[in-house]
Amino acid sequence: MLIKLTHEVGDRGYSMARKPVLFSSLVKPLKAWWQKTFFAVGIAACILFVIMDRGGVDHVKEIRINLTDAVLPITQTIFHPINSISNFVDDFKNLNQAREAVKVLEAQVRDLQEELIVTQGLMIQNRRLKEQTNFVDFPDTKIITGRVVTHSGGPFLKSMLINIGEDNGARLGQAVISEYGLVGVIVEVTSRFARVLQITDINSQIPVVTENTRDPAIIKGDNSRFLKLKFIPNDSLLAVGDRIVTSGHGGLLPPDIPIGHIAEIDGTSVLVSSLVDWDRLDYIRILDYRFADDLSQYLNNSSD
């Protein structure tokens, strides 16, 4: 009897060892069920909140506002260190960029200082040469500043109205410039306003020279943003990028007023790009060139 009981107990113990009841086997199904249920309930709640919010239910708006008020401080607290680190990294990058920019600016300042020394020496030398040769220069030019009132731009006319008239010193034939270069010439004057014919107008023709080689030419408008260079000497050595300035021939315009750069050379066709920013042209200056009046009076007296 004892032996038989022992065998039965042994068999039972062996059976229990082969099939133990673990806690994880009970938790895993509950965990999976909870995740699925929570996910489904969350989606359903979101959809329900959206529908009710669209429908204008006040309770949903209050819940949303309260949740936002509750979650926002926590979110700010969590993301504050992250934002601080991100800002620190950005400041560090900006600091390195600023150091590189400072190095470039220091190099430019050194170059400009060297050019300033050379320019001052040339100015002194130029003044001494003028004194030694009794050089007679053009008279000083008075400047009158004003603003553009309106543009009369069109396919067949390029002109503008400015708020400077005879009462302010405006006269026919005076040059009008911007901070970049020549804008045009005054063609009509009243007591308070004046009309300026732009250099881009097809009727505009101005005597010019190339700044480096001093080759004479006539620059003509084309009712576009490009100007045409005409009557160029055959032996001229022009290149793209050469600057074109007024020649002063005829005494109407002062010499060496910048007009533009050569943009394209195609055989005998030379296009010049104006320096004036026509779309943003606001303030202008009139050059009261007294030499033109003296010259006109001299020519009139000679003809008489």
Image (cartoon, rainbow, N blue to C red):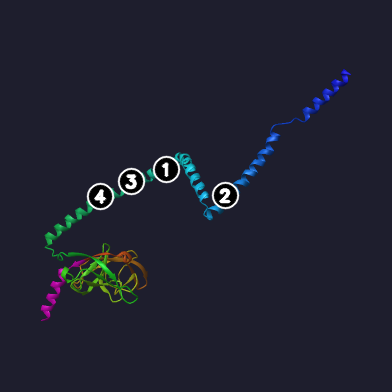
Q: What is the quadrant of residue 176 in the picture?
A: bottom left
Which type of secondary structure does the marked residue at label 3 adopt? helix
Which type of secondary structure does the marked residue at label 1 adopt? helix
Within 10 angstroms of label 4, few (less than 14), some, or many (20 or more) residues? few
Q: Is residue 77 magenta?
A: no
Q: Residue furthest bottom?
A: 304
Q: Position of residue 26 (x, y in %)?
A: 70, 35
Q: Is residue 5 above or below residue 203?
A: above
Where, quadrant-wise, is the N terminus in this rendering? top right
Looking at the image, do the residues carrying marks 3 and 1 touch, with CB atoms under 8 Å apart? Answer: no
- As measured in the structure, the alpha-carbon distance from the residue carrying label 2 to the one carrying label 3 is 54 Å
Looking at the picture, tell me which residue is in the foreground, 68 or 285. 68
Left or right of 43 in this view: 89? left
Q: Tell me, for residue 87, which label it has, or none.
A: 1
- Circle 2 is placed at which residue position? 46
Q: Earlier in the sequence, mark 4 or mark 2?
A: 2
Amino acid type, residue under disc 4 in the picture: Gln
Looking at the image, do the residues carrying marks 4 and 3 touch, with CB atoms under 8 Å apart? Answer: no
Q: What is the quadrant of residue 203 in the picture?
A: bottom left
Amino acid type, residue under disc 3 in the picture: Val
